[in-house]
């Protein structure tokens, strides 16, 4: 009897928590289809009006372009560096290996806000004040540790004899890497890139101090819009972002499996 | 197919010596097995020959040519790894073709040789399967085909059957023996399983603590172990401490476990020297009364175990030592599971040929 | 001898021999070259700037000055610790982060267990529900809570429709709202940490305890929970330090009286341009997180030292 009561209470709490996790996202999507400017629930009439409004808001459009370009460039720069570093780390049996790994994953541990401030202050001290450059450096730091981590995790899953097998069959180091190792770690690398891209695109805390009036990323554009307006165009742009993310996630899940993003 | 020679090979990790001045010759076309417990240096030896490990001293010769500093990619070896190391993203045929592609063999030729080799290992019909879609035995054969298709100077196998169940392992042993004999490949096999070593090899080298203890044909190793270690590893589990009390050209006389008996002469032993007396479990016969002639000691059965075609006894000799005895069940009555019950008084006797002597170190 | 074997042994190869690996390799030339770009990026774009901030925090405050000087002072720190307005913010930040972490542990255990016990086919869906907030921008998530908790928000509308309240409850722009937002943001990370630890636990253990006479409740607390400590430790350290340094949630949901260290830091750098004081605040933020982290690791180490086998 007690056991069943305990079990029932547990399940109820669990479902309440699942609801809690989904509530804000679901509500954002619901509100985005509301025809009225004032928030009302349930919506009195449905329309796509606010989507149109959001797509015509100049700060959103330029923000989206900035964020996309920034995330692409950061991923393009961080991926080769991260994969190369992970390979070297995986291969070495050097004593300092653990320390180096920690160093490369450090950007995950240091709060984004602190990364942003540190870059702002240091670059200002060197008289570098170009927002695009500052942002790019910051975002490379966002993407890099994810690529390193997922690549390391994929490498750890490989049979260490594979490289040796390729070598005994006559492959040199480069051929062994390109034909055997790379195809096998590709899913992990791609997962790390995609996750890094999403986090770079969505980032607020690193970018907060690195943007300037002319170069603003999408999340920061939404945030400043939000401080003065509360109309559902925010919901519309947010819904579009949710949709985009779901799309990416579904593709990743289909092709690679999400799990490796978080393990290893 | 090449003759492979190791000259004075040493290997050190930090301060530990993994290989201590190994000398070994694998004659062309022969199948040699390195046998020994884990940590004895057999895998290190194999990696030195494969070029995956640089020895700290000595030379490796393939057909008289020094290849010590040649990387494994250029040694032309075929290796079957313990984990098989099949490339999971390539089909069986692509796996087999890999070494030929690396050698820039032309495409038509690759196709021909891959097909021929897959037929040799009886996998022609599964060429387009990925490793994950193949059974354990089929994966083994792909690995073997991949190693053999490049017509290697030497085929190296690192405990490839360790993960297989007994039945499959025995089938694979037969198949491997047949294929290597057919292709006359010089082969080096590493295992810790003495039966496997005896079944497969032309030559067996028993290793211990980074040295080769004895090298010879399976018959030699099994029947005439040169050291106590080899005897132990070949399944001779009965050791008595004794003393040499007499020697002639045709026999030597030993005193052990309270009695004196004769054994085949062993050169190099001096009178009064301490020796280990090793007696093969299958060489001992248990009888209820004292057997006429020969060597026998009274004792008591402590344990009797039924193993199917054989059964084993643990006999405590009255003079102290314990013997393990193994005998065939061929003559056993249908419903009995042992000739002697626990606690029975028996005599344990053996022929002179069953005794091996080793000087105490 | 075959053709291939002969050619491999041919002297022509001797001139272009590949490198042979030695028994135990250090970082070879090629390996360090591969590491170089990433290590340089992290050193020059993260470690050096962090050091810069630390030094800046000990320089005397001069508005608009960003270059380092040799003059060292504790003025910036004194201002933080001696003025009640600032020290109250520090305390509030710590307590909000602690409450958030505590709630995340409790809720995280419930969610992780519910995922762990779910039939395999449902497991994937449940994981996706839990990590869905991670995949959406923090701004979107926070806006979502404003839609739910606002005076005209969905929760108030529902409660009014059900006749439970007449006047809307003021939920936004309070400390409570900040905590709700933070828990929502960090719960996924806690759940993932706990799940990672659960994956390593043999499911037969709890069953073994039950065959020995433990109820399922006791089996959880005595067997499963202690084995989860490494995962909980990871979760607690991540959540606490991220909560300490979160900016968007307190800035958008916190209103005037629920400011945290991060909103104060933002003011120093963007509004009042007092970078030296701001740098001191950043250093205090990091130090507090590190101290908390050290305490948690010590306690967890004490509880698991005897049995935890390091991989």
Image (spheres, coloured by chain):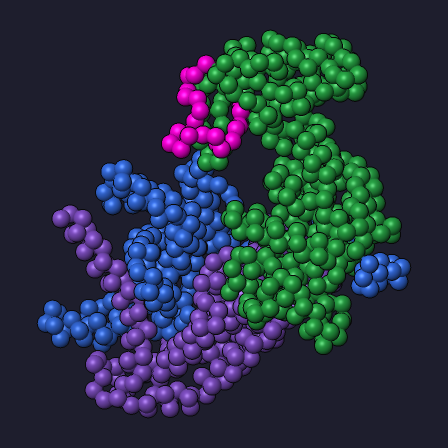
Give the extent of the magenta segment.
B324-345
Q: Quadrant of residue A21?
A: bottom left
Magenta-span inclusion, residue B325: yes
Q: Please say whether residue B159 is one of the residues in the magenta stretch.
A: no
- B278 and B130: which one is in front? B278
Give left or right: position of C265 versus C63.
left
Task: Pick the quarter of the image with the N terminus of chain C.
Answer: bottom right
Where residue C153 appears, x then y in whole percent? 24, 75
Chain identity for the colour purple used in the image: A
- Residue at image coords 68%, 15%: B262
Q: Is residue C89 above or below residue B324?
A: below
Q: Residue A169: image x %, image y %?
A: 71, 61
- The colour assigned to chain C within the rendered structure: blue
Say left or right for C62 vs C257. right
- Position of A250 relative to B132 (above/below): below
Q: Residue at x 51, y 31 (%)?
A: B328
Q: Residue at x 42, y 78 (%)?
A: A247
Q: Position of residue B310 (x, y in %)?
A: 49, 33
Residue C121, visible in the rendered structure: yes
Q: Colour of chain B?
A: green
């Amino acid at each position: 009897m007690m056991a069943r009561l305990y079990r029932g209470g547990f399940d109820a709490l669990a479902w309440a928590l699942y609801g809690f996790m989904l509530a804000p996202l679901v509500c954002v999507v619901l509100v985005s289809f509301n025809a009225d400017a004032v928030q009302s629930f349930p919506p009195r009439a449905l329309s796509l009006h606010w989507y149109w409004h959001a797509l015509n808001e100049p700060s959103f459009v330029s923000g989206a372009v900035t964020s996309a370009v920034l995330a692409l460039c950061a991923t393009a720069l961080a991926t080769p560096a991260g994969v190369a570093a992970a390979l070297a780390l995986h291969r070495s049996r050097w004593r300092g290996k653990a320390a180096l790994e920690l160093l490369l994953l450090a950007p995950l541990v240091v709060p984004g806000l602190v990364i942003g401030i540190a870059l702002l202050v240091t670059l200002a001290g060197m008289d570098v004040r170009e927002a695009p450059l500052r942002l790019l450096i910051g975002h490379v730091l966002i993407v890099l540790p994810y690529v390193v981590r997922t690549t390391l995790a994929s490498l750890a899953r490989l049979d260490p004899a594979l490289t040796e097998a390729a070598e005994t069959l006559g492959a040199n180091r480069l051929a062994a890497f390109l034909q055997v190792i790379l195809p096998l770690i590709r899913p992990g690398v791609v997962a790390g890139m995609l996750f890094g891209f999403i986090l770079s695109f969505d980032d607020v805390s690193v970018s907060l101090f690195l943007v300037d009036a002319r170069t603003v990323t999408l999340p920061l554009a939404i945030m400043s819009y939000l401080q003065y307006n509360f109309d559902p165009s925010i919901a519309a742009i947010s819904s579009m972002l949710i949709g985009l993310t779901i799309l990416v996630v579904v593709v990743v899940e289909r092709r690679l499996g999400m799990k490796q993003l978080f393990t290893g | 197919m090449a003759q492979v020679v190791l000259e004075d090979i040493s290997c050190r990790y930090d301060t530990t010596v993994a290989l201590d001045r190994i000398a070994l010759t694998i004659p062309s076309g022969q199948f040699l097995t390195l046998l020994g417990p884990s940590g004895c240096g057999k895998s290190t030896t194999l990696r030195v020959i494969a070029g995956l490990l640089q020895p700290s001293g000595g030379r490796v010769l393939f057909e008289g040519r020094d290849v010590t500093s040649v990387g494994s990619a250029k040694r032309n070896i075929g290796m079957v790894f313990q984990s098989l190391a099949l490339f999971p993203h390539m089909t069986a045929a692509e796996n087999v073709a890999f070494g030929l592609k690396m050698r820039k063999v032309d495409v038509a030729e690759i196709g021909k040789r891959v097909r021929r080799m897959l037929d040799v290992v009886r996998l022609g019909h599964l060429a387009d399967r990925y490793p994950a879609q193949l059974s354990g035995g089929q994966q083994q054969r792909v690995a073997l085909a991949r190693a053999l298709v490049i017509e290697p100077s030497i085929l190296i196998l690192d405990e490839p059957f360790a993960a297989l169940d007994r039945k499959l392992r025995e089938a694979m042993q037969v198949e491997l023996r047949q294929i290597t004999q057919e292709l006359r490949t010089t082969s080096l096999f590493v295992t810790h399983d003495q039966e496997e070593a005896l079944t497969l090899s032309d030559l067996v080298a028993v290793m211990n603590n980074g040295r080769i203890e004895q090298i010879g044909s399976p018959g030699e190793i099994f029947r005439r172990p040169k050291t106590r270690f080899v005897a132990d590893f070949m399944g001779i589990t009965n050791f008595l401490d004794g003393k040499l009390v007499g020697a002639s050209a045709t026999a030597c006389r030993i005193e052990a476990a309270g009695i004196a008996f004769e054994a085949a002469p062993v050169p190099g032993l001096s009178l009064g020297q301490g020796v280990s007396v090793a007696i093969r479990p299958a060489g001992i016969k248990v009888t209820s009364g004292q057997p006429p002639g020969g060597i026998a000691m009274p004792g008591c059965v402590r344990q009797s175990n039924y193993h199917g075609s054989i059964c084993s006894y643990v006999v405590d000799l009255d003079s102290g030592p314990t013997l393990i005895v193994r005998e065939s069940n061929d003559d056993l009555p249908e419903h009995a599971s042992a000739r002697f019950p626990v606690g029975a008084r028996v005599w344990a006797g053996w022929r002179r040929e069953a005794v091996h002597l080793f000087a105490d170190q | 001898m075959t053709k291939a074997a002969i050619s491999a042994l041919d002297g022509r190869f001797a001139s272009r021999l590949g490198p042979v690996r030695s028994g135990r390799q250090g970082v070879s030339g090629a390996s360090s070259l591969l590491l170089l770009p990433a290590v340089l990026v992290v050193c020059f774009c993260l470690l050096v700037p962090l050091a810069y901030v630390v030094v800046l925090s000990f320089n005397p405050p001069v508005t608009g000055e960003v270059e380092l000087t040799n003059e060292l002072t504790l003025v910036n720190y004194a201002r933080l610790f001696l003025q009640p307005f600032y020290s109250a913010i520090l305390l509030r930040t710590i307590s909000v982060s602690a409450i958030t972490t505590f709630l995340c542990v409790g809720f995280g255990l419930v969610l992780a267990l519910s995922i762990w016990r779910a039939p395999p086919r449902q497991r994937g869906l449940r994981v996706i529900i839990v990590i869905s907030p991670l995949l959406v921008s923090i701004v979107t998530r926070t806006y979502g809570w404003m839609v739910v908790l606002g005076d005209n928000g969905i929760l108030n509308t529902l409660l009014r429709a059900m006749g439970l309240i007449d006047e809307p409850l003021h939920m936004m722009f309070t400390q409570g709202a900040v905590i709700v937002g933070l828990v929502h943001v960090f719960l996924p990370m806690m759940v993932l940490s706990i799940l990672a630890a659960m994956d390593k636990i043999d499911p037969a253990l709890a069953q073994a305890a039950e065959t020995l006479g433990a109820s399922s409740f006791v089996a959880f607390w005595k067997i499963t929970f202690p084995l989860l400590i490494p995962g909980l430790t990871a979760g607690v350290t991540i959540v606490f330090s991220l909560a300490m340094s979160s900016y968007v949630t307190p800035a958008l949901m916190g209103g005037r009286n629920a400011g945290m260290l991060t909103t104060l830091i933002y003011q120093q750098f963007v509004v009042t341009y007092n970078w030296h004081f701001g740098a001191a605040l950043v250093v205090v933020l990091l130090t507090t997180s590190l101290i908390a982290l050290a305490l948690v690791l010590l306690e967890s180490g004490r509880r698991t030292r005897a049995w935890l086998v390091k991989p």
